[in-house]
Amino acid sequence: MTAEPAVSVRNLSKRFGSTQALSAVTLSFARGEVHGLVGENGAGKSTLGKMIGGLYHQDTGDLDVFGKRVRRWDIKRAQDAGVVLIAQELCLVPALTVAQNVFLGRERRTFGVLHSGLERRYRELERICRFGLPPDVPVDRLSIADQQKVEIMRALARDARVIVMDEPTSSLTADETARLHDIIGWLKSRGTTIIYVTHFLEDVLAHCDRVTVMRDGRLIRTADTGRETKASLVEAMLGEPADMLLPERPPAPGARTAPLVEMSDVHSGERVRGVSLTVRPGEIVGLAGLVGSGRTEIARVLFGCEPADSGRIAFRGEEVRAASARASIARGMAMIPEDRRAQGLVLMRPLFENVTLPHLGGFSRMGVLGRRAERAAVGELIERLGVRPRQVDGDISVYSGGNQQKVLFAKWLLGRPEFLILDEPTRGVDVGAKARIYQLIVDIATAGTGVLLISSELEEVVGLSHRVYLVRQGSLIGEVAAAETSVEVLLQRLFGVGDTPTTSTPSGNGEDQ
């Protein structure tokens, strides 16, 4: 690229405690280009993006924005200079409406008095985005996917000249992702620079002009995307060729194996409607549906986070009464939620406390915690799971998304659950961490744990599950044998295209697959 740089960094370095997150990175981003940043979780790509966006300040090195050396830099100064960060961790005000969040800090005032007209300005922006979000709904009522759309609209409302997008499509459907890529193309045509941090390598190759590969906080190479392939990017990210295939499924449990978990005609509000399903020990069962179909709500009712209005839930053959998350954990159930930062981790506590939090009774005697045993158990587990950095008292808030996800697995595997619900287990996770999480899921099922798997990436559901239930508008509309079903067929069923027959015999009644 020969265009004048919008942003340049030279010998940029950043350390968090004992972790060197960025090491002497030198790189430029041209005006009007879409520049991909890829690498494993922990490679430093998000750290670099957050430094450009003003969230972090470098320890050493220089940052130039539109030809000017930056001395003092924070989010406000960045936005005033036309640089906006869309972080992977959503930063919205829950009690404010969609429109209020979109224009927060950009309200029009005269002598301190707010002008009306937010809805008109919002409609103008909606004509560009076409996300279909109502302007007057509080964002705490929105799904994670819809909240991510609000973040995207907020960046566009600031007329940014540089936008750093950190995993912007991790919660979006295929149609919404395509719409975002159209918006990116429109922004590029106006001369906006897009720094696109993502683990979806296909998107990088299809929509970016250049791509930079990072590994262990260092820049490996920058190249035109036309000179790269998915395989070449993965090899550069990992430092060696990688097997991109999903691991082989564990053997399916026999037809006569009694169900571990059963839901029979369960209703809960408007989001769960007459759901009946089973999961056997050692079986991986998928829940496939579009965003908003009710997949997560089914899982939350099953785990006891939401009440069931009617129907029957049974665990190991016994009906579950007075369901709650605490009671489910005591029974031997566990759940990894879709939003690890808001629902899964306590970010102000160290790593080992996050892992042992549901299991403190096993480390205490007469009300006194045995810290040495606690740390030893956690240290052994994070070593086995490959958590990096490997520090039992590490600051979990600065760990990469993939390593935070491994810590969540450690949190529940410490208790050796009999049944594990996984809601978007690889969201915001790079290709290397994905492969390790896939293998971990297979190992968990092989050891006899029943797994209920929810993922927006249908390749995961089809590739890992034995059976898949199809979810639409809170109801199960069918069941398929994953090994005999393609992603294309699954999508047709979910969108209601044609009348494609199921490829398996329903197993809710215990028949073999």
Image (tube, rainbow, N blue to C red):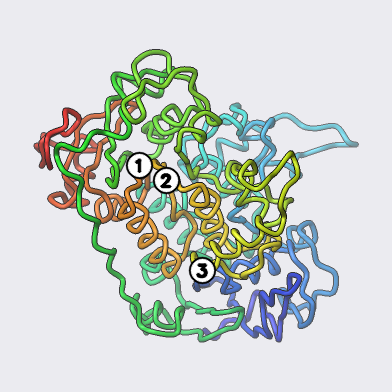
Q: Quadrant of residue 390?
A: bottom right
Q: Is residue 503 left or right of residue 206?
A: left
Above or below residue 471? Residue 194 is below
Circle 2 SS class: strand
Q: Is residue 331 left or right of residue 20?
A: left
Q: CA distance from mark 1 to mark 2?
A: 6 Å
Considering the image in quadrants, where does the C terminus appear? Answer: top left
The amino acid marked with disc number 1 is Leu
Instruction: Where is residue 380? Give x, y as percent.
Output: 56, 65
Q: Which mark is residue 146?
A: none
Residue under the point 19% across and 42% down: 492
Check whether the beta carbons of the residues at disc 2 and disc 3 lie within 8 A of each other.
no
Q: Which mark is residue 422?
A: 2
Check whether the beta carbons of the residues at disc 1 and disc 2 lie within 8 A of each other.
yes
Above or below residue 438? Residue 448 is above
Circle 1 SS class: strand
The amino acid marked with disc number 3 is Gly
Counting residues from the N terminus, which is met first, the one under dot 2 or under dot 3? 3
How dense is the environment of label 3, judged by Cα within 10 Å: few (below 14), some, or many (20 and up)?
some
Q: CA distance from mark 3 to mark 1?
A: 23 Å
Residue under the point 74% across and 65% down: 56
Instruction: Where is residue 327? Give x, y as percent.
Output: 52, 28
Q: CA distance from mark 2 to mark 3?
A: 19 Å
The amino acid marked with disc number 2 is Leu
Q: Which mark is residue 452?
A: 1
Q: Which mark is residue 386?
A: 3
Check whether the beta carbons of the residues at disc 3 and disc 1 lie within 8 A of each other.
no
Residue under the point 61% across and 32% down: 140
